[in-house]
Image (cartoon, helix red, strand yellow):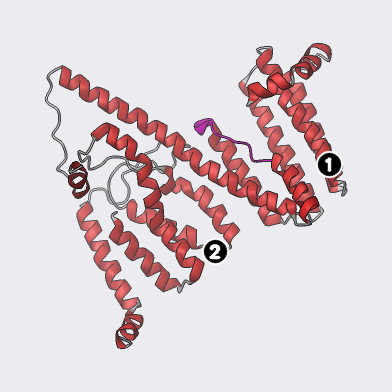
Amino acid sequence: MRKYSDKIFTWLIRLFHEVFGLSPNQVSILSLIAGIVAAAVTALGFVFDGLLLMALSQVIDALDGGIARQYNLQSAAGAKLELYFDRTCEAAMFAALVGIGKTDVLTTVLAFVAIILVTLVEPYSHFDPGFKRFMLYFGWLLEQLFRVRGFEIAMTVIFFANLTVFAVGTIMAEYRLQREVDAHAIAERAAMAAAGIPLPPDDPPSLISRIASWF
Amino acid sequence: MTIIPHLLVTTLGVQVMGLHGGDIALAYTFGYGIDLIDHPIKLPLYLKKNGTKNEKYYHWRTPLQEPVALLWIIPLSIYLHTPVPVIFFLSHILLDYMISYDKRPWYPFSLYTTKGILPAASDALKEWTTTAVVLAANLAVGYHAILSWLSNR
């Protein structure tokens, strides 16, 4: 996904880094400023303009990582900074939408909590499909097309999608650990057998293992 | 623990709390249903390691039925405006933590492992005692309902 965005924004990456001389962290700060301005504009009631600015913030957001990768400027601190800034922009935008009554406080807070949970588990699961700010455009579209509380629906989707991603993420991480533990045990057993060391006796068969052995 | 004590504890909870409709479905989902999703996830790994042989203390559990799952179950309960998922999930893990095999309560955020509550006591004794106590409690709480069901037959 990131590599695709790097290809799409190649000329912008060059412009920001080679022409303007901006570092990835400076681009992250620009993205944060654009995100906060987007939230402020939304809070003033100009939802469409706010969303346009949010889109600009997201485009700039795609550039910092691109610059870091392309010019070999990646750092753990930079990745962390981007993460904090992304969450700050989301919190600001969500608060703005609550402030103008486009969505309710509880669903919005829960949606943000779910996003935080995904952020916490992502380093272990390496799984984050990104149901975050992007859903707000759909919320706006729903509001325009069907005259429904689109942002509230978007927040509900963000909440459930991220909660699911979190639960699945914890399972993925643990599954990987179990695969390693099992592989180690299998290798140990094989080494014992090769060395002629008697293997520990098997556990007595359970009812389920007896049934399974019929097949 | 096995299916019977989980079902009995869930049934007791449903009776004591006087749950209806969707809350009953939530109670059985979080009191027992998570087992049905959780164990099949590890089945391919188990079969790869053991085939059809029995490994008594294989780590069947995923974080779906560990305390770490409270991080998503509590927000879900708040969204649904009901404490039922949290209460019945807690009852589920309480029973599981009475059996003394290794558990990773906070994985992936911590590698801490535990054998649970009273690991020195016999698992069979804990399971049979729990089953007997909860069965008796179910019969006591549902006494009137059972009597009226019998008198209607």
In the image, residue A22 above or below residue A107: above
**Residue at 74% across / 17% down in the picture?**
A10
* Highlighted range, magenta: A123-132
**The N terminus of chain A: image quadrant:** top right
Does A112 sit left or right of A185 as displayed? right
Q: Which mark is residue B38?
A: none
- Residue B87 in picture, x, y percent from top left: 46, 61
Secondary structure category for the residue under label 2: loop
Mark 2 to mark 1 CA distance (whole Å): 35 Å
| B62 shown above or below A142 | above
Residue A133 visible to an observer of this rendering: no
Residue placed most toward the observer, A18 or B132 = A18
- Using residue B14 as the reference point, say whether residue A161 is left or right of it: right
Residue A19 percent across, percent down from the top left: 83, 12
Examine the rendering and report whether any part of residue A177 can be seen: yes
Disc assigned to residue B82 = 2
Using the image, tell me which numbered label, if any, was put on residue A50.
1
* Camera-nearest residue between B80 and B22: B22
> Circles 2 and 1: CB distance less than 8 Å?
no
Residue A127, magenta (yes or no): yes
- Residue at image coords 61%, 41%: A116
Residue B47 location in percent, x, y? Answer: 28, 36
Dominant secondary structure of the residues highlighted in magenta in the image: loop
In-image side of A139 versus A69 (left or right): right
Q: Give the amino acid type for the residue marked by disc 1 in the picture.
A: Gly
Number of numbered labels in the structure image: 2
Given the image, on which type of amino acid does mark 2 rest? Thr
Task: Tell me which chain the residue with mark 1 is part of.
Answer: A
**Label 1: which secondary element:** helix
Which corner quadrant of the image does residue B49 belong to? top left
